[in-house]
Amino acid sequence: MVSGAFEPGAMEMMERIFALFGFVALVALLAPLSTHAAETEKIAASGEQAGSLGPSVTFNSGSSGDLIDSGTLNFTGTQTFKAITLNSPATITTTAVSFDDIFKETGFGVEFSSRFTDHLGVHAGVSLKALNGKTFDGFGVSAATQIDFVGSGSLTAAGADTIRVKMDDATEWGIYGGVKVHPLVFEKYSLYLRGDVGLLSSDEIKARFSLVSNPGDSIKVEFFEREIQFFGNGGAGVEIRMGNFDLQGEIRAEWRDKRAVADGVQDIVGSNSIVTYPVSFSLMWRF
């Protein structure tokens, strides 16, 4: 009988992120109340530009949580379990792997924002995330066996071995909207808090599997399915005014829903929701 065990840990991760969002939202709501009432007059009434538009570039500075969870799958003989067949008794062990060990991510986007007061505004944007796939040791095989990934091909282990994974590059499109609060506003710069929610659209992502002992023999396997993911973030930044332009720099904590694992590797792969920490720079034209 085949058994599999994965520890998702998604609930604990979500609780931490929701606590972070709640803290950011509370500070964002209370901070403007401590400023003088004269500072909260509407920008439109003072003749200032009330909207801005511009491009941004984002770098992923790190992540927490495992995108791929650890687990084991035990075969007691020649068996097929869903989409994987082994021809002799063996155990496949899945190694926990973080988002940073699977992808290097860079983001590009365009954002529009509108300010109601010196301290409060809303924004919306579109983004393109470029995911450069990395190579990692994903699975351990305990004994000599043939591993058949149904519909994709097979690998033959001469003994205990490791399956190495080379993830394909991928792109994701996103849309989002949110609120930005400036609790501290000065003549040439301001400090702000922001919160966003949005959706990411991703194509299917494939990976190349090979055994460490025989890297020349490899197969291509669908790893993550085409899907739409939910995400939310909270962060803080600084906005510097330069004539009719604003230079913005910020860091965020971004929660992303778990990915949909493809049928061909569902037996040995479990995915969790994660948190990434993107650093973003924007050049906004005020109008």
Image (cartoon, helix red, strand yellow):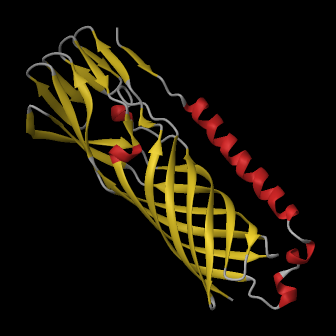
Q: Check the picture and name the quadrant holding the C terminus.
A: bottom right
Residue for point 22% across, 12% down: 78
Residue for point 77% across, 88% down: 48
Query: Where does the image place residue 205, in percent across and percent down from the top left?
Result: 35, 49
Horizontal side of 117 relative to 144 (left or right) equals right
* Foreground residue among 105 and 282: 282
Residue for point 47% across, 40% down: 260
* Foreground residue among 70 and 267: 70
Query: Where does the image place residue 71, in percent across and percent down from the top left?
Result: 38, 22
The quarter of the displayed image where residue 169 is located? bottom left
Query: Where does the image place residue 149, in percent across and percent down from the top left?
Result: 25, 31
Residue for point 56% across, 32% down: 10
| Relative height, residue 4 to residue 215 (above, below) | above
Horizontal side of 65 relative to 235 (left or right) equals left
Q: Check the picture and name the quadrant holding the N terminus.
A: top left
| Relative height, residue 99 to residue 116 (above, below) | above
Inspect this view and state whether residue 150 appears.
no
| Relative height, residue 108 to residue 219 (above, below) | below
| Relative height, residue 197 to residue 220 (above, below) | below
Name, please, the residue furthest toward the right. Answer: 37
